[in-house]
Amino acid sequence: MDGGGVATNAGINYQQRVSASFLTLMVLKQEISIFNERTITSLQLEGIDKIDDLIINLDDKQKLFFQIKRNVNLSDSKQSDFFKTLDQFIQQFLNNQNNESYFLVTTSYSSSKITRNLKKILDSTRLNSSNINLNVLNGADKESLNKYKKVVKNTFKKYTTRDITDKEFLEFSKRIFIMDFDIEENSSMERVVLSLMANKITINPSILWDMFISNCLRYASQRMTVSFESSQKIYNDYLSEIDVRQNDSFNILDDFLIPNFEQLNVASGKEVLLCKASDALNSISNEKNIDFYIVELFRFDEECNKKVQFIDDFCISSDKQTHLEVIYRASSHKGLLKLINENINFKNKSIGVLPANGIDYVESTLCAKAYSENLITKFKNHKDYLKCIECGKAIAENRSIIVEIEQQGSENNIGLIHKDCLKPVNRVLGYIESELFQDYSVLKNFDWKLWVEKIMHGQGLFCTKMIQQDYSVKHIIWNSSVEYDTCLNYCVKEHLEDNTFLYVLRRGQVERFSKQEADEGAIKLNEAIERQTSIGDPICITQKEQVSSTYSKLKDKLDIDDKLIKIKSYSVEKISQKIVDEYSRVSNYYAPLFYILNGENQELFYINDRVILISDPFLFESYLDNWKNSLDISLNKDYELVILKDDKHFDSFMQNIYKKEMKAVINPQFDSEENFINGYLVEEYEDFQNTLSMSTGEHGY
């Protein structure tokens, strides 16, 4: 199905996964940020247009055409996938439709001249309205641009019998997007898609995901168009609905980012209390041996004034004469009974019931309806509704509670609350249930929303396949002297043996220096080049992933489609924003990561004087099992997870543990002999100043 020819199984599988990802976005009504938060209205697979792998229509009439290639190389050969893709793009462009954009979707297995160099050039055209800036292009960039130009010009002339104008070339280039999309089986990107899906469906996300993939193959084989409306009919049975009627449990409200409150129904007309027995309650019931009472009260009078107040742990009547000590407070009997049944302290206790006559239809009164609508509006306006309304920490536990909170002297509020944070006078409205939270219950207080937001543009260190495939103990360098928001004016240019160039990076960003620092740094790096060359172990960089180290450290770790390029020299250059934009690689080099606070005293969890950091929440339980089985080390019952959301947060954390004379380790694993066999030992930069460690964006002098 790739370009109309015979595709490999891997190619078909990749194309299905890409299509299934966009089908997921459409079914869940998710927005596409690169197109001003637009949503998908329909998908067409293997269409009849010139660009036919996938066609997406957005709700603002924009039309996106996709060619999906798992592995493509930059080539001007007419038989190459790159040439065929541009040929299709040109044919579509000649239709003169201004609302169209063209995507080449591929993986990191494709040539870096496409995924990095050409992508950078095309992104630049959308920032520059008049031309393609050649000043900041290195040799590889220019080679990519020249081949791209050659194919575009020849193809355009083939269909028009004239040369393409500069204006047409620029307009065409602005419409092309290159998307590096590694949606392989069990990849981190696939796990992100499953995470986004999990909270909005009623079945296991992996089952629905496999269904999407299978259906996408069928849609493509039949050249079908799937609209949002038809997809809702097909998959509606698997989508969650929100329902808190009479305190029934309900599925978690959203997929981390966009709540759906359409069917939220809050009960507001009565108070259902579990109270400690008192003389006043005993006299009403004419009982003496009762431990607790379930008390039912009308909440509003005829003018919609509340008939009782709640102060501290007491319900106080309007005349201030009756004080009931509240154990639990709910909006229905069903909700209250769930609280009672879940608390072992009420086993074998006698519980009396004091009902209110004529209360069955109280939820249909205007007072109750108006109050409920107000609560729902407040819930909709919550920006961080997946945060506990009491402690402010993330909600990540299955059957968390939704409550209404009334504080004397302040406006009422509504939100989610941890079970351990629930106070007696918090009015319980319902519960949330989530297969994700249930399946990953070990991730206590984990902020899923924050993690998904940060992971998409972070963890630059862990993105390279060389790092991922190196199952061994690795040292990574942490430099405590990094400055953020610096305005220094110079950078250091890296000249390669193939006459291309790069720039010295720190944490995936082009590093800025003062003139003196840049001069001194370039001298030290050039001295290192001479020293390594003299001993026959030159400093090199990998072409695809730009991992730099000595030849001896890289030669056996190289991908089959990658190659080593020697670094010839370093020089100093005045920096520009163009250089920063085009050569920086990630927003965060280390983050996001998370660490563990263990026990009631919230102590940092560590093994062998190394504080534990984890890079993948989906593997956390596996690490716990490994530590238990290999070292007989377990977490206390009371623990929680804290996310280091960006590199600034990571730096602050590292500085704090160094003050405590501790170090850090990321993703540690041990064998049955208690030997450390896999993970990342984080070492301070000063300890490695005189060594050349493998680097993917952290250069040092």
Image: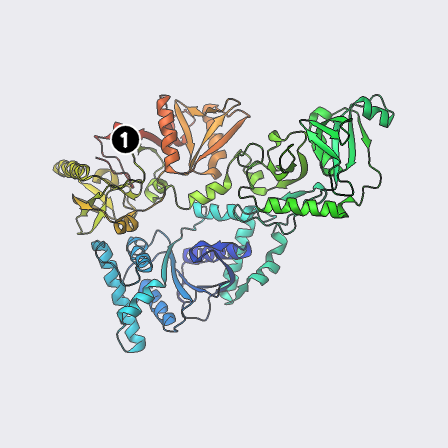
Q: Quadrant of the C terminus?
A: top left
User: What number of labels is visible?
Assistant: 1
* Residue at far bottom of view: 161
Residue 473's quadrant in the figure?
top left
Asked if residue 187 shows in the view, the reply is no
State the residue position of label 1: 685
Q: Residue at x 39, y 34 (%)?
A: 649
Q: Residue at x 85, y 27 (%)?
A: 284
* Residue at far right of view: 286
Q: Is residue 455 above or below residue 229?
A: above
Residue 466 pos. (x, y %): 32, 42
Which of the two residues, 417 or 142, is positioned nearer the viewer here? Answer: 417
Residue 526's quadrant in the figure?
top left
Q: Is residue 124 above or below residue 492?
A: below
Residue 378 pos. (x, y %): 61, 44
Amino acid type shown at disc 1: Tyr
Tag 1, which secondary structure? Answer: helix
Say left or right for 616 vs 127.
right
Which of the two residues, 575 or 298, is positioned nearer the viewer here? Answer: 298
